[in-house]
Image (spheres, coloured by chain):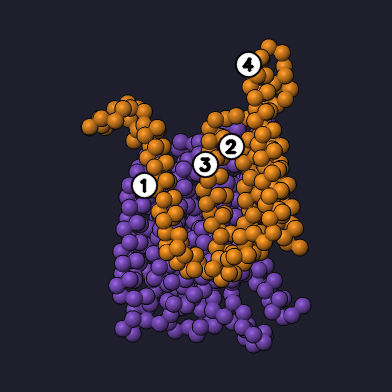
Amino acid sequence: MLFYLFGAVAIVASLLVIAQRNPIYSVLLLIASFGALSGLYVLLDAPFVAVIQIIVYAGAIMVLFLFVVMLLNAPHEDTEEDLETPGVERRQLAGAGVRRFGGLLAVGLIVELWWALTKNGGESGAFPAPSVASVAAIGRSLFTAYAFPFEVTSILILVAMVGAVVLARREPITRSPRRGSPGSPDVP
Amino acid sequence: MTPLLIAQIGLTLFVFVMLLNSAAIMVYVERKVAAMLQQRLGPYLVGPKGLLQPLADIIKLLFKEELRPRAADPLLFALAPIIAATAAFAAFAVVPFGAETTFFGLLDQPMRLQVADVNVAVLVIFAISSMSVYGIVLAGWSSNSKYSLLGGLRSSAQMISYELSYGLALAGVLVIANSLSLTDIVNRQSGAWLGFLPRWYVFLQPLGFLIFMTAGIAETNRAPFDFPEAEQELVAGYHTEYSSMSFSMFFLAEYINMVTVSAVATDLFLGGWHGPLLPESLGWIWFLIKVAAILFFYVWMRWTLPRYRYDQLMQFGWKVLLPIAVVNLLVTAAGVLYFGA
């Protein structure tokens, strides 16, 4: 019963994400979809994964999304009508490219869905229930069997962080950064 | 319906009403303590000693006109205060506030004084508090006013920055207690060392407690970290354009968040409902006393310390609080490894 409720919310919210013109609403609907997903995790006896889903995706990543959408202040996405108004040929061309790419993505998604749905059993049967229910068990397997992927992921995130810092720096990196100079990066 | 189910529903309603009441009481306490600290009288006209002042405030708020700026986004403008208030109420659901009780023999089996017993309660609180930022951010954005937007953006930056230290301070306690359930954590703090010093985690994690309280004040947007609503710079920050009930929702959310942070701090660091003299079944009295003490401290801080500058806030959060929290966690983990849990 609850499964169908959460499932319906997740699907409807996800569909509405791409049906919105206002990106802020898209972000909010995506959060609703994540919330429904975490409800599904609770039904699967994995409360830890459910809460982490909320903390990481809904609580941290989506806040940054919202932040970016607000600061870019893009109230409307270009719609079909906008693209087909006369005098915007460059946009029309871009629109055609986007449509072709979108078609490719849709075909890929359908093939993937078909593959996932017809594959009987699947990996989910391989996990014994307590290993996802208990935090201790998750921690243990994360730091023993999956230690290498875990460390590689953390290095990946570190690289991304360093990259973001380098990109966000306005002045070139010198040996002694002049403190207090106009436009110095330590002023938020 | 079994008696246990009725008791559970009753408890849920009770917690809801008490949270509403606690906000009203906090309004009164805030005014009275502010008056004490500033050598004024504070409210004294409505009711004995001004005790009915919160009621007068509520009636005043209810009868104000509900205004909405023409350029505001109508849906989100209405939704934002609801998100803020819902998140504030929801977080308290997993906070235990007393030992198991049968309500003086009314129930056949003991019941926990907690709305929902979740085995990852600490993380649930963390998750819900990270959701509460949406109420403020959306309020700031949907008002379509520059003061509101600045307030909303400040608040999201502030809450994201301090959430890290908040989480790391929690992690110290979790490592010692070896559990994510608040009930387990509280029960591990019963008894005393050397016969007189209570086994509270505040004595094992003094630094963790300080970090938790500091980050908690920042999370609830209270002075000296009340940047999202800094009056002198932003009129009223994210709720500048709100009036009447939707304004009071934000007001309510702020006070309930304070109560929740205090209750969580009590459970994590101050031994929850464990205390001398009273029997275990009346432990909730100790719980109330401890929460009240922390709340008083909150109000005391607000009227004592001036607001920081915004860059100081960020510097403090990232360059002082976060490194200390990381070192605290490392030392705690090493200690647990060396001495055993």
What element does badge 2 sit on? helix
Q: How far apart in space, not on screen, are marks 1 and 4 (Cα)? A: 45 Å
Circle 4 marks a residue in which chain? A
Question: Are the two marked residues, 2 and 4, in contact with CB atoms closer than 8 angstroms?
Answer: no
Q: Residue furthest top?
A: A87
Residue hosting label 2: B141
Residue B318 - label? 1
Output the chain of dot 3: A
- Say which of A105 and B225 sits in front: A105
Spot occupied by residue B29 in the image (x, y as percentages of width and height): 50, 59
Q: Mark 2 Cα within 10 Å, few/some/many (few <14, many 20+)?
A: many
Chain B visual colour: purple
Q: Is residue B41 above or below residue B336?
A: above
The answer to whether residue B112 is left or right of residue B278 is right
Task: Examine the image and state in which quarter residue B140 appears.
Answer: top right
Q: Nearer the viewer, mark 3 or mark 4?
A: 4
Instruction: Relative to A181, say whether A38 is above or below.
Output: below
Q: Which label lies toward us, 3 or 2?
A: 3
Residue type at tag 1:
Trp
Cα gap from disc 1 to disc 3, whole angstroms: 17 Å
Q: Residue at left 35%, top 57%?
A: B325
Q: Earlier in the sequence, mark 3 or mark 4?
A: 3
Res. A64 mark: 3
Chain containing mark 1: B
Vertical relation: B150 (above or below) B200: above
Quadrant showing the N terminus of chain A: bottom right
Viewed as shown, does residue B128 lie left or right of A16?
left
Neighbourhood count class around disc 3 (C-alpha, 10 Å): few under 14, some 14–19, many 20 upward: some
> Which secondary structure, mark 1?
helix
Name the N-terminal-most of marks 2 and 1: 2
- Residue B145 lies, with reference to residue B102, above or below; the image says above
